[in-house]
Image: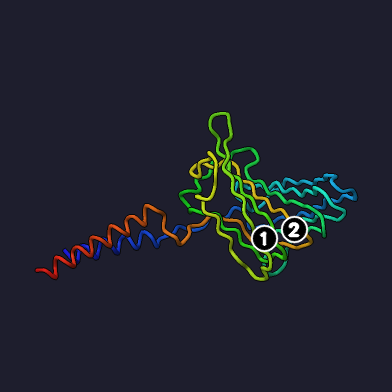
């Protein structure tokens, strides 16, 4: 009986440790855009957009650079070099800028993200200052699109590749991660700073889901019970 309990616990641990491969939303490879939204007057809005074929989920990326206010410049471009390709975003001092990347602009991704993982992974190469990051996913319900949203802060002072993990459980809204039709990623900065994003992906985190934790607890209790009975015998 003790042997059987050990087998059950090992199976539960294996279930908790197993993780499917990541699904890349965008690794910013095989495309080039240099978007500049420039304004000389405070509070004047300016926007530059581009829709391009890219190595992304759905095969296209709609990239937008927006300047909401300030006297400087907002720059968005996809950098190419021998080491890696990145999404680069820069806002001048006192300038409020936003970069937006949309995937599935026709609401036709039909992606089951839940079968791949339980979190978004944002790989940040560098970030001079804190920036607000947002992710929105949308699901089609009949003729309507319903959304789930997350907003958080990417810390400043990042000088080497760092992953920001956003669990699906941190989202609020009605969209289903088992049937995602649109994905939007935004990065917003309001101070002088440079930001570079290497990759946006869906991955399985190392933290077991609540159901798995429950299985682990049951397995551990069963093992303790079997041991005590064996000792008494």
Residue 136: x and y in percent read 61, 45
Q: Quadrant of the C terminus?
A: bottom left
SS for callout 2:
strand
> Mark 1 highlights which residue?
197
- Give 26 or 29, whichever is nearer the viewer: 26
Q: How many marks?
A: 2
Outermost residue, top direction? 143
Residue at 90% x, 50% y is 40
> On screen, 175 above or below 97?
above
Crowding at dot 1, Cα within 10 Å, few <14 / some 14-19 / many 20+, comes out as many
The image shows residue 26 at horizontal and vertical percentages of: 62, 54
**Which residue, as the protein is rendered here, is positioned at the far left?**
233
Neighbourhood count class around disc 2 (C-alpha, 10 Å): few under 14, some 14–19, many 20 upward: many
Left or right of 26? Residue 230 is: left
Give me the residue at 23% from left, 60% from top.
Answer: 222
Secondary element under disc 1, as helix, strand or loop, is: strand
Q: Between marks 1 and 2, how big is the CA–CA gap?
A: 9 Å
**Number of the label disc, if any, that sits on residue 104:** none
Which residue is at the far right? 40
Residue at 36% from the left image edge and 59% from the top image edge:
15
Q: Quadrant of residue 160?
A: bottom right
In this image, 149 relative to 49: left or right? left
Residue 75 horizontal/vertical position (percent): 80, 56
Asked if disc 1 and disc 2 are in contact, CB closer than 8 Å, the reply is yes
At 66% from the left and 68% from the top, the residue drawn is 158
Instruction: Quickly name the residue at label 2.
Output: 89
Decide which of tag 1 and tag 2 comes sooner along the chain.
Answer: 2
Near-viewer residue (178 or 230) = 230
């Amino acid at each position: 009986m003790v042997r059987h309990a050990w087998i059950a616990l090992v199976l539960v641990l294996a279930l908790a440790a197993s993780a499917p491969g990541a699904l890349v939303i965008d690794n910013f490879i095989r495309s080039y855009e240099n978007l500049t939204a420039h304004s000389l007057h405070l509070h004047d809005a300016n926007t530059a957009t581009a829709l391009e074929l890219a190595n992304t989920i759905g095969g296209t990326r709609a990239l937008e650079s927006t300047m909401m206010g300030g006297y400087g410049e907002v720059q968005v471009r996809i950098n190419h070099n021998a080491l890696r390709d990145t999404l680069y975003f820069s806002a001048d001092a006192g300038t409020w800028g936003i970069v937006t990347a949309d995937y599935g602009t026709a609401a036709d991704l039909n992606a089951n993200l839940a079968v791949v993982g339980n979190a978004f992974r944002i790989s940040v190469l560098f970030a001079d200052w804190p920036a607000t990051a947002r992710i929105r996913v949308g699901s089609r319900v009949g003729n309507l699109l319903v959304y789930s949203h997350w907003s958080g802060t990417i810390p400043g002072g990042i000088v080497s590749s760092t992953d920001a993990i956003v669990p699906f459980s941190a989202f609020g809204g009605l969209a289903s991660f088992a049937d995602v039709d649109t994905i939007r990623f935004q990065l917003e900065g309001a101070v002088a700073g440079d930001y570079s994003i290497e990759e946006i992906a869906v991955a399985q985190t190392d933290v077991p889901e609540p159901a798995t934790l429950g299985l682990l607890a049951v397995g551990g209790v069963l093992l303790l019970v079997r041991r005590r009975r064996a000792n008494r015998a």
